[in-house]
Image (spheres, rainbow, N blue to C red):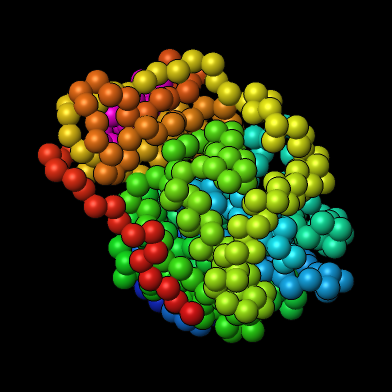
Amino acid sequence: MTFTMQELISAKREGKALTQEQLFWIVDSYTEDAIPDYQMAPFLMAVLFQGMDDAELGCWTDAMLSSGELLDLSSSPLPKVDKHSTGGVGDKISLPLAPMVAACGVAVPMMSGHGLGHTGGTLDKLESIPGFRTQIGIDEFARQLDAIGIVLAGQSESLVPADRRIYALRDATGTVPSVPLIASSIMSKKLVAKDDLDGLVLDVKVGSGAFMKNIDDARVLAETMVSIGRSYGTSVVALLTAMDQPLGAEVGNANEVEESIAILRGEGPADVVELTMILGEEMLLAAGSDDREAARATLEDAIASGAALEKFAEVIAAQGGDPAILEDGALLPAARDTQVVTSLREGTVSRCDALTVGRAAVRLGAGRTEKGDEVDHGVGITLHAKVGDAVTAGAPLATVRYRSRHRLEACLAVLETAWDYADDSQPTRPLILGEVR
């Protein structure tokens, strides 16, 4: 049976539910280049505004999952637990978290994505490591998981190819913040090893720098993904976490890798360290750890012993990267020129807006404005003042590392509006805002 894309775009635009046959046809046809971007983009926009009902979402997720091969990870005897974030600014959590958990004896088959809109992507950060390959075939994926207990990869040509293409198109067409599109994208990637996955931990961001701006929308997204996982027989827990201001001090790619290395050395900003530990606890609990305190102690031991950092070195080497970056950060790309943004007044920072900082980083070249844009891994923003910090007039708020004067000016026009001030002390929002199990 064949359909016309014009008819299906119109039907979804009018809020009509599409059938399983129609949804599978759209996914299969787009994957096979039978539907052009200029038709897929308005369909995604219609989904953004009209949504999908439960039946449609189940079919759409299944169609994307079925667009490629599935992973067989049964040869690894270790419990297998994955983690995914819905995207934020300065969110480098996966980089230290995955090797920490793997160093604790849990296999981590992590499939991630590139940046979407103003949010950074795990793959973009990893690709700033010289030589690091994020594209791995399914046989190599399984062999590497068996050998070292960790894989940090993106979709290959054969793994969820529909999502890989739709993901890039959503990024370039303003169709990212849609519950069904986010949920199906994440879950289709995570369920390619559904028969072998023991647990999945989701970090659902909430706030200005997240796609879900308020707690109610974030909870709907979390419940949707947990429900999808349950329908496939996979145990899923979702934590709702704050994203009103960037995580940590670094926003970019190579500079976020450096901050991740610091965390693996037992250093790093307190907010990133704490969220990494909390998510790590959930992953170890999903793998069978006795209790939360024991899980925390195991994670802390992996850091203190150096085992977590060594595991990161192993995965870097296994995927073609240079593990020497762990000892010499100068091997990572870095733009030479810098510009300091300073405070115009004395006071306490009451706002360091994640969305504004994220947009500024994209203008700098750390993210994409169009499908297929190259990312400059060496540019970025280092934050010196966040909510609750006292500053004086002329005090540094951020340092911008840049290559192009034109891009710097575009960045500063946005970045300089990220901060507000108060005359008294300011409370910070809790990191964990809720959970769905």
How many numbered marks does the figure carry? 0
Between 194 and 179, the one lying in front of the other is 194
Q: Residue drawn 64% across and 52% down?
A: 303
- Report the magenta stretch's main SS: helix
What is the x, y in percent for residue 108? 70, 62
Magenta span = 408-419
Quadrant, the N terminus: bottom right
Q: Is residue 264 left or right of residue 244?
A: right
Between 32 and 213, the one lying in front of the other is 213
Q: Is residue 31 left or right of residue 398?
A: right
User: Dividing the picture into quarters, in which one does residue 48 lie?
Assistant: bottom left
Q: Residue drawn 66% across and 38% down?
A: 127
Tell me if residue 209 comes above or below residue 325 in the rendering.
Answer: below
Q: Residue drawn 12% across and 39% down?
A: 423
Tell me if residue 201 comes above or below residue 249 in the rendering.
Answer: below
Q: Give yes or no for residue 418 being in the magenta stretch.
A: yes
Q: Give yes or no for residue 324 being in the magenta stretch.
A: no
What is the x, y in percent for residue 410? 36, 25
Q: Residue drawn 38% across and 71% down?
A: 434
Instruction: Say whether residue 17 is visible.
Output: no
Between 6 and 404, the one lying in front of the other is 404
User: Dividing the picture into quarters, in which one does residue 29 lie?
Assistant: bottom right
